[in-house]
Amino acid sequence: MTSFPLYIVPTPIGNLEDITLRALRVLREAVLIAAEDTRTTRVLLARYQIETPLTSYHEHNKLSKLDAIFAALETGPVALVSDAGMPGISDPGYELIGEAIARGVRVEPLPGPNAALTALVASGLPTDGFVFVGFLPKRERARRELLAELARERRTLIAYESPNRLLDALRAIEAVLGDRPICVAREITKLHEEFFRGSVSAAHQHFTDRPPRGEIVLVIGGAPVDDAVVWEERAVRAALRQRLAEGEPLRMAAKAVGAESGWDRRAVYALGLEEKDEQNSP
């Protein structure tokens, strides 16, 4: 067991001044910095005249780099940094952290910048409870399925999204969750920082007129209290028949109707099988 720690070091999400004195000290004293994107990290290190050796650690080389990182930990502390913000959040850093814990390495996290929490507190939406879902799925079907699972969630929802998929995501959110309040946080702490606060439909129109750029966080209002009403069976069957008639797969339709109606999706799926049997019977 090594006596040297793996430090989890948050780095600025935009403005390079958003880094703690302790983080700078740890980066200077480490024998190695494992960085998700060495190009981005070099800019930060150059700004603060830090000359600690760098190695890349990202999704495509995470397995091949483990031996070198743990060998470095035998000689001194190692700092883990992500492209921006808190390592381990929507990046492969969490796997390195898990492996370090499994090997008995001391893991020491530093507090610091995080895009999701920064967007949340600036959104104006409730902060007493929230659900972070990471990046929304790229494929439309998977994206709608995830949203359907979250449709009855009362807590504020937070998701990451890329600018080229933002309009598709907003369309899916409105279709599945309804025209809820939303905050689209873009380029947080950077020169062109923007917080759009309004309805999902208004956000779609805004970013249709002004194509977005940069990193994006979506903060979505939770399900209204009125959504707690449980539908009667005939309403569930009617909604299910409509989706199936439109060609939606039963599994996806059951999830969506279950989320909208207050029914367990397995019960809705069973109703769907009954509907199909009735349609196929002579």
Image (cartoon, helix red, strand yellow):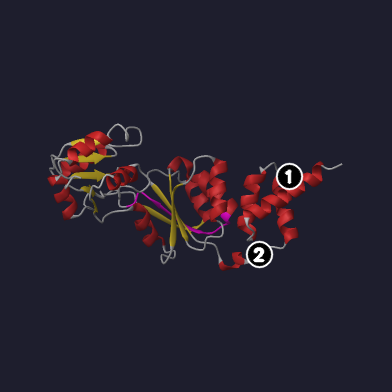
Which one is earlier in the sequence, the residue at label 1 or at label 2?
Answer: 2
Q: Residue furthest right?
A: 282
Is the residue marked by circle 2 packed among few (<14), some (14-19), or many (20+) residues within 10 Å? Answer: some
Q: Position of residue 71 (x, y in %)?
A: 19, 36
Q: What residue is shown at x 19% (from left), y 51% (from top)?
A: 23
The picture quadrant where one finds residue 119 is: bottom left
Q: Is residue 181 magenta?
A: yes
Tell me: residue 225, above or below residue 33.
below
Q: Is residue 150 magenta?
A: no
Does residue 124 appear in the picture of this structure? yes
Q: Nearer the viewer, residue 42 or 109?
A: 109
Is the residue marked by circle 1 packed among few (<14), some (14-19), or many (20+) residues within 10 Å? Answer: few
Q: Which quadrant holds the C terminus?
A: top right
- 38 with respect to 272 (left or right): left
Three-letter residue code for mark 2: Val
Q: Nearer the viewer, residue 177 or 282?
A: 282
Q: What residue is shown at x 57% (from left), y 55% (from top)?
A: 177
SS for dot 1 = helix
**Which mark, residue 230?**
2
Q: Residue furthest front?
A: 1
Three-letter residue code for mark 1: Ala
Q: Which residue is mark 1?
A: 245
Tell me: residue 261, above or below residue 136.
below
- 121 with respect to 146 (left or right): left
Q: CA distance from mark 1 to mark 2?
A: 23 Å
Q: Which residues are magenta?
A: 177-188
Q: Nearer the viewer, residue 75 or 183?
A: 75
- 232 with respect to 143 (left or right): right
Q: What residue is shown at x 25% (from left), y 56% (from top)?
A: 111
